Amino acid sequence: MVNGITLNDLVYSSILYQPSISSVQEFKIDNSTLSAEYGQSSGAVVNVATRSGTARFHGELFEFLRNDAFDARNFFTFNSSEPPPFKRNQFSASAGGPIIRGKTFFFASYEGLRQAQEVVLNSVVLSDAERRSPANSNIAKLVELVPRPNAVDSGGTPRFIGSAPSPIENDQWAMDVSRNLSGSDRLNGYYAFNYTETNDPNGRGNTVPGFGNFFLARRQFFSLNETHTFSRDRINGFASGDGGGQAMGIPADPAERGTGGNGHYRGREFRP
């Protein structure tokens, strides 16, 4: 949950997206004895509060790097002594401060992810004799899409061992605006937009190159919170929000291209 509003995709029962690290002020994890407001699914509930601007301008930058220089070879890669190529860059920029001093504040953040990776593929494939056996012309065309063996295991079974690219691109923008309406009332609005492209050569159970799954998603989230302080020990909060997006999966299987699907999902919530 973000600012008291669910961040789950209610259609697929999964998280809509991961909030940017820079936009998180604090979080709380409840894993037992949950109250009625935390329904929908079992397990732990993570409640995130987003960052707001302060009376002074400030900003942050960070870069996280990981690559194959720090990795070991996959145990099941028999035809190479080096790990497959891997480059991961996660970076962010954020800034916050006053819009109207003492009254209105903002906090904006951007986070990006660029990952270039080759995943290991290890699969049983047709032998040369089996490739020549199909009498049906359509089956023979499909056989040509399967790579030829480049290794034989200890049992004499022909296998293809190699790698295929699995790039990931992710961009996320977020804006938080807070307004002190009075000494006892505070209004907060938060909006985030996420765009993701992934190519998974292991998708749909694939183990040979040229197949897999391409996935594209656009996600949005909005929350609006009003907090009223009655006294030092009595506070009332009202939260409403809207989240959803569009996702499209395209099979990379040459025999199934054109059969991809796309979906829309949306969820609204009001919480006193």
Image: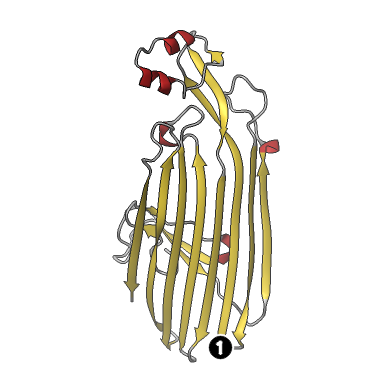
* Residue 16 against residue 235 in the figure, above or below: above
How was this image coloured? secondary structure
Within-10-Å neighbours for mark 1: few <14, some 14–19, many 20+? some
Q: Which residue is mark 1?
A: 103
Q: Label 1: state its secondary structure.
A: loop
Question: Quadrant where the N terminus lies?
Answer: bottom left
The foreground one among 174 and 73 is 174
Q: Position of residue 212 (x, y in %)?
A: 46, 35
Q: Is residue 2 above or below residue 185?
A: above
Say which of 213 and 183 sits in front. 213
The correct choice, above or below, for 160 with respect to 259 in the image is above
Residue at screen point 55% across, 75% down:
52
- Kind of residue indicated by mark 1: Lys
Coordinates of residue 144 in the picture (x, y in percent) = 46, 21
Q: Position of residue 121 (x, y in %)?
A: 52, 27
Measuring 60% from the left and 56% from the top, which residue is drawn there? 112
Percent position of residue 91, x then y: 64, 56
Q: In the shown orientation, is residue 15 left or right of residue 114?
A: left
Number of numbered labels in the structure image: 1
Instruction: Spot the residue most to the front.
Output: 137
Query: For residue 265, what is the image quadrant?
Result: bottom left
Residue projecting furthest to the bottom: 182
> What residue do we see at 52% from left, 16% from top?
149
Q: Which quarter of the rendered picture does the C terminus lie within?
A: bottom left
Tell me if residue 85 can be seen.
Answer: yes
Looking at the image, which residue is at 52% across and 20% down? 160
140 vs 159, nearest the viewer: 140
